[in-house]
Structures are given as C-alpha cells and as structure tokens.
Amino acid sequence: MPHGGGMEIVMLFSSAYIMQKIIMIPIVLIALTFHELSHGFISSKLGDPTPRLTGRLTINPLAHLDPIGAVLMVLTGFGWAKPVQINPRYYKNPKRGMAITAAAGPLSNLLMAFIAMLIYTAVIIIGCKTGQFQYKDSSVSYFINSQPDMLLRIMSFISLFASVNLCFMVFNLIPIPPLDGSRVLGLFLSNSAYFKLQQYERYSFILIIVLSLSGVFSRFIGTGVGFFMELLTRMSMAIVGLVV
C-alpha cells in the first residue's frame, strides 16, 4: 500500500514555504520602512516640510505601508510602499534635489545590507578563530562545518536580510519612472528630456508590473545583487579582519 510519501513532501514544502514567507515579513518591513524614511528625511533636510507634515519621518512601518503592495511584496517578491509626498519647489535646485532624495532610498538599503554583512562576516571569522567553524575560502565563500541550530537560523536571517535589501536597491535604481533610478537619471538629462520622461510615469508603472511579474527583471536584479553581495562580503572581510 502507498504510504502517502508524496503528500508528506507537499506538506513539508508548504510548511517551508509558509515559514519562509513569515520570515520575509519583518525583513520587508524594515527594508521598506527605512527606504521610505530616508526619502523623507533627506527631502526634509533639503528644506521640504512635506514629509514631516504628512507623518513620514517615523520608523513606524504602518506610516509607510501600502497594504496591497506589502502583501504582494511578501508573496511574489514584487510590491510597493506608500510613496513619500515631497514638494521639490522647496529645493534650491529642484532637479538635483529630486535626484538626491531619490538616491537616499536605495542607499539606505545598501547601508543596511553592508551592516548585515559586517555582522555575518564577524560571526564567521570569530567562529573560525575559536574553532567552532571550519571554513574554506573559495571566491569569498564560507563552508560551515557545525554550529548550533539557533545560530544557523540567525545567520540565515542576516544573509537573507542583506539579499532583500540589495534587491530593493537594485530594483529601485532601474531608470524607469516612477522608480528612484529615473529621478537619479534625470540629473544628467536636459530639463525637457527629464520632464518628458516623467510624463510617462502612469504608463511605465504598468510596464514595471508586467516586466516584474513576468520575470524579465529577474536576471538583471540577480546579477546586480550578486555583484554587490560579493563586494560587500570582501569589504566586510577586510574591515572585520582589521578588528578581530
């Protein structure tokens, strides 16, 4: 008689899938919150009171969440936050101010990924020096011999946290309106070309959704994340190696 092995595999897969999505929730909330907060903070520093008046200078995730966008982000990997309202008329140089404000979001994700990799690398190096880990250096890769289950889970969380933040950064730097990369690109365009680019924002958002859900962006984002992950790992190793 069959013993239902296939059903057990399906249940295990479903359980692992659900657990992964649960773990993604705090990571997405942190990455999204500080991304949007950074937009508002820099805009405020450039003289714009709008983020403060609309309650966006806060680490409360609820102030930055778009419910539908957040659910889609956890389930599909694509979603959106509530856009931070800014008024570029308060900037001394509106186009430059828009570019700086836009760049602040992806840079915050890069910084969080870097901090995560510093912690991850420090744990690995300390573990190796104390004999708890065994590692082999192969293109800046670590192979862990044995470690407590809880520590393994924490390190997996830290690694995933870094990866998700890098995904946020790379995706948002795509130069298609309304993504941050289009505002940064605008700094290098003529005023007429810049405003013409922004005119297509309504339609390009639909294009972004289609390209994201169809997987067209996956290779580009994966390549970018891989590049920055290796770069941050090497930098982390150099910095931690000087201290530990």
Image (cartoon, rainbow, N blue to C red):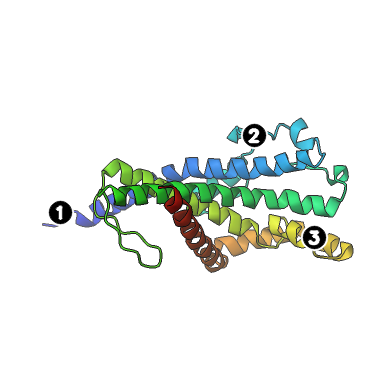
> Mark 3 packing: few (<14 Cα in 10 Å), some, or many (20+)?
some
Q: The N terminus lies in which quarter of the figure?
A: bottom left
Q: Is residue 184 left or right of residue 7?
A: right
> Mark 2 packing: few (<14 Cα in 10 Å), some, or many (20+)?
some
Q: Residue type at mark 3: give it.
A: Leu
Q: Position of residue 200 (x, y in %)?
A: 78, 61
Q: Which is nearer the eye, 110 or 238?
A: 238
Within the image, what quadrant is residue 194 found in? Answer: bottom right
Q: Is residue 15 left or right of residue 217?
A: left
Q: Residue type at mark 1: give it.
A: His
Mark 2–mark 3 distance (CA, rounded to whole Å): 29 Å
- Report which residue position mark 2 lands on: 63
Element on which disc 1 rests: loop
Mark closer to the observer (2, 3): 3
Mark closer to the observer (2, 1): 2
Q: Position of residue 157 (x, y in %)?
A: 41, 46
Q: Position of residue 163 (x, y in %)?
A: 49, 54
Q: Residue type at mark 2: give it.
A: Ala
Q: State the residue at coordinates (78%, 51%).
A: 98
In contact (CB < 8 Å): disc 2 and disc 1: no
- Report which residue position mark 1 lands on: 3
Pick whichever of labels 2 and 3 is earlier in the sequence.
2
> Mark 1 packing: few (<14 Cα in 10 Å), some, or many (20+)?
few
Mark closer to the observer (3, 1): 3
- Report which residue position mark 3 lands on: 187
Q: Position of residue 114 (x, y in %)?
A: 52, 51
Q: Is residue 226 left or right of residue 156?
A: right
